[in-house]
Amino acid sequence: VPEQPRRSFRQVLLGVMTVQVITLAVLWWLQSRYGR
Amino acid sequence: MHWINWLIVVAYLVYVVTDGLRRAKGTSHIEGYFLANRNLPWWAVGLSVMATQMSAVTMIGTTGQGATDGMRFVQFYFGLPVAMVILGVTLVPFLHRAKVYTAYEFLERRFDAKTRSLTSFLFLVSRGMSCGAIISAPGIVFSAIFGWPLLYSVALIGIPTVIYTMFGGVQAVTWADVKQMVLIVGALLLIVIILVMQLPVSPDAALRVAGAAGRLQVFDFDFDVTKQYTFWSGIIGGTFLMLSYFGTDQSQVQRYLTARSVEEARSSLLMSAYWKIPLQALILLIGVLIFVYYLFQPAPMLFNPSHDSRVRAADPAGYAILEQRYQQSFEARRDAAAALAEAGAADAVGARVFVAAESTLQAVRGEALTMAGAVTGEQTRDVNYVMPDYVLNHLPLGMAGLFIAAVMAAAMSSIAAELNSLSTATVIDFYRRWVRPQGSDAHYLKVSKIATAFWGVFACLIAVQAGTLGSLIEVVNRFGSFFYGSILGVFILAMIPRARAVGAFWGLIAGMTAVGLVSFGAPQVAFLWYNVIGAVVVVVVGMLLSMGAPAGTLVTRDS
């Protein structure tokens, strides 16, 4: 039983990091393609 | 504004108040009133956390900042996901399992009563004042664009919020936050769609033109502590700020104390970790697109209509000359932007011509802003009027009403959470702790409602006096930044078993003093770094003083 929340927290963490990496990649792309 | 727009605003206000009063039925004792019996689902708490953080300034000021300064402000939030993950595994389990009403109550269990009372008092002073500022910011904008006295705008936002918060308690606050968040995000998405459709150039050309004007510079890797928004101030200073705000500020802590379990409290915080940066980037992008829109559509020289009419009346001849120069520079910039949009990516000469035209126009606008400042004696803050000007004059019928309702929703969600938490800290940390420890539940519930009303009236009075209290509010906000990081330091100490009460109290004083010294001695240091300095000094001084001090009561994660 204690393993389940830890695993799910790790999964959520992975999700958070994935969304942040995608967002930062999009912002980076915006700056490198259109920025000065 | 058209009556249909007003109808939308009135419908929103009636709905939010009646729905809040309906929630009052479930709150017959203080655990229900302050913590919804610790039984709210994670997604509602998560939306409430996000709605509390998003104020009217986000809707009005941040979009304006996107239009005038570009995307770089998004770096401010880079530390937020990091902070949320750290809080999820550290402070959230401590606070939730301790079954406390306030974060400061936990400090008494861990250290002593004076540390609790001092931190709670600092929260009451700063949040009481900032609540007034949260009401006054949209109030001033509404007054300028609709020509009302500030009192009317403050009453329109403040009274409904006080009513549903006072009677409905945290249940009303949270469920109103959920609906307000849906309204805010829905309105923003609709505006993006309409804006893209209204642009006379393709999205690719629009971004190219915005990029040439420097509006798409997102990242700044310069490690310069005097710059407000850099990658490093965001990721380091921002992490400490967000740890302080979400981990130790009662207005946020109270949101996730209402969650059913530690897991749900964690999940509610992680919702912000997921969505805050994308949402903030979207809001800034709206501002950037409005900048592009106004390259092709005539925009007022001064966006603040009140300042525009006052300067026009004070110096009609001088203002007319300036307007003529503005019109000429607008036409030159429009032609340069159109040429750049048509030419494609490789047109370096076209980009230079456009940038020069943009600089000329901004110089004229700068002169107009200086003139407005001299005539009105007020800070211009013209950036806050860019978005309202676009919404009121360039969007289809109904959208202005929806936007005004969304701005009110953003303001009300923050105000309601703050009133609710101010009341909680007043009653739990002071009234029940020092004045009447043995009162009945019904008595505390009555006092809680009175405290909510008191803070509501206090915030509205501060908001109405915002013009004359402007410098005082700034002083309090500056004072607030002195202790934000320091309070975080106390909570970090609380999780270190060897830390003692004497270290926590004097460490807090030392941290605030250190930040105060940096603030006055080196005012060029960006405020985000204050949080790092405060927290580090408290932990270092606190641990030094704790060495040799007698052992106190320890609260472990499972107690």
Image: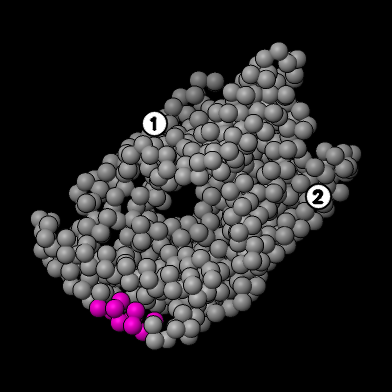
- Of residues B272 and B322, which is closer to you in this image? B322
Q: CA distance from mark 2 to mark 1?
A: 42 Å
Queried whether the magenta region covers residue B323, the answer comes back as: yes
Q: Residue B355: x, y in percent? A: 22, 62
Q: Residue B450: x, y in percent? A: 80, 56
Q: In this image, B191 relative to B539: left or right?
A: left
Residue type, numbered disc 2: Leu
Local secondary structure at mark 2: helix
Local secondary structure at mark 1: helix
- Of residues B232 and A31, which is closer to you in this image? B232
Residue type, numbered disc 1: Leu
- Of residues B156 and B219, which is closer to you in this image? B219
* Magenta-drawn stretch, dominant element (helix, strand or loop): helix
Q: In this image, B460 relative to B45: left or right?
A: right
Q: Which residues are magenta?
A: B319-328
Q: Is residue B384 above or below residue B103?
A: below
Please report the residue visible at 70 percent of the width from the left and 21 percent of the height from the top.
Answer: B500
Please report the residue visible at 69 percent of the width from the left and 43 percent of the height from the top.
Answer: B122
Tell whether label 1 touches label 2 (CB within 8 Å).
Answer: no
The residue under label 2 is B445
The residue under label 1 is A14
Please report the residue visible at 75 percent of the width from the left and 59 percent of the height from the top.
Answer: B453
Q: Quadrant of residue B433?
A: top right
Q: Quadrant of residue B557?
A: top right
